[in-house]
Every structure is written in C-alpha cells, then in structure tokens.
Image (cartoon, helix red, strand yellow):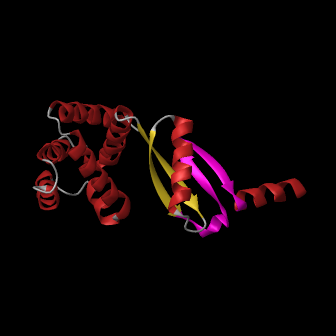
C-alpha cells in the first residue's frame, strides 16, 4: 500500500472514531471494496483520467449518496477533488487493516476442494484463533484444483495442506 493511501485512510479512520461511526464505515467500505474487485466498469471509472471532476462527482452521487454513511460519501468527493480516487482500493485496504487491528481480528482465507461441514469449519476457526490469538474472519473458498485437503492464507502466509501440493512435492523428489 502507498503512503498516500495510508495517510488518507488514517485521517478517515480517526474521524470515524471521533464520530463513533467506525462500524458503519467499515461495512460500507467493505461493500465498496467488493465493487472494486467484482466490477471492471467500476475499476475503470476510478482510474479514468478522461472524466472531469464534475462527471466523477455526478457518478459518485448516483452510486453512493444516501447509501453509505455521509462521512464516507463526503470523503469520496474529497479524494475526487484531490485526484486520488485511483487509490481508493489502497485506502480501503489500509482502513481495513487499522480496523482489524483495533478490534483484535484478522482475516483468513481457506480453500477446500469440496464443501466442508460446519463443525469442521468451527474446528479450523478455533485452531486459527488459538494460533494467532485473534478473532478470525474466515472466508471459505471452493477450489477443486487442489484435489483434496485445504490451503489457509492468513497473516501474509500460505499454509498448504492440499493433496495437489503433496503430489507436486512428491513429483519434485522423483525427478
């Protein structure tokens, strides 16, 4: 993440704390991050240098006014004025990191080849909480390409217990 994104997110984070609006802001920013990830048109809008300030503001108004906390809507207009809308994803990621830190939470992504039972999910979550001493926010992803087992991505590390990894390792040893 860029230092610029970190500075903007820190300012927004502190303002949200002062206004006791942190939870609502976090939820809205998570929704916007999902838009950035899922929608190519939205990503293009954020980085399109051909749009004027007025056009950008009109689009932001149509998309977000009255649908996100007012502080976030005004922040989006502000970074548009500062020509920083293109770093919105970095701002959101930095904000998310601060939010997770202050709430003693962390994100983990678990890939499995097949759907797993709720009690197995609970077991894995509990193991992760014990290991990292934080409340887990776990995203479960189906990925048949790993054949079996699971992969966990948490705290910047990949823990790979997949059959595919074991087979790849075995093939490396035999060649």
Residue 56 point in image, percent of width and height: 16, 55
Residue 170 point in image, percent of width and height: 83, 57
Residue 40, picture quadrant: bottom left
Where 15 falls versus 40 (above or below)? above
Where 38 falls versus 2 (above or below)? below
Horizontal relation, residue 174 to residue 138: left or right? right
- Can residue 99 be seen at all in this image of the molecule? yes
Which residues are the magenta region?
142-163
Residue 102, picture quadrant: top left
Query: Image quadrant for the N terminus?
Result: top left
Residue 126 point in image, percent of width and height: 52, 45
Residue 52 point in image, percent of width and height: 15, 54
Residue positioned 34% across, 48% down in the render: 89
Residue positioned 12% across, 62% down in the render: 62
Horizontal relation, residue 96 to residue 132: left or right? left
Q: Nearer the viewer, residue 170 or 7?
A: 170
Residue positioned 10% across, 56% down in the render: 66
Whether residue 31 appears in magenta in the rendering, the answer is no
Q: Nearer the viewer, residue 94 or 126?
A: 126
Whether residue 155 appears in magenta in the rendering, the answer is yes
Query: Image quadrant for the C terminus?
Result: bottom right
């Amino acid at each position: 993440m860029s230092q610029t994104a970190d500075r903007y997110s820190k300012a927004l984070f502190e303002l949200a704390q002062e206004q006791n609006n942190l939870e609502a802001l976090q939820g809205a920013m998570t929704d916007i991050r999902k838009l950035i990830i899922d929608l190519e048109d939205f990503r293009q809008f954020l980085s399109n240098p051909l749009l004027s300030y007025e056009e950008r503001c009109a689009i932001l108004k149509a998309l977000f006014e009255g649908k996100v906390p007012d502080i976030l809507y005004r922040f989006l207009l502000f970074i548009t004025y500062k020509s920083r809308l293109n770093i919105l994803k970095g701002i959101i990621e930095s904000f998310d990191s601060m939010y997770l830190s202050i709430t003693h939470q962390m994100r983990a992504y678990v890939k499995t080849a097949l759907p797993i039972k709720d009690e197995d999910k609970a077991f894995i979550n509990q193991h992760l909480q014990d290991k990292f001493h934080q409340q887990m926010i776990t995203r479960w992803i189906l990925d048949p390409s790993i054949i079996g087992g699971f992969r966990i991505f948490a705290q910047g590390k990949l823990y790979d217990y997949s059959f595919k990894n074991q087979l790849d390792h075995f093939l490396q040893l035999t060649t």
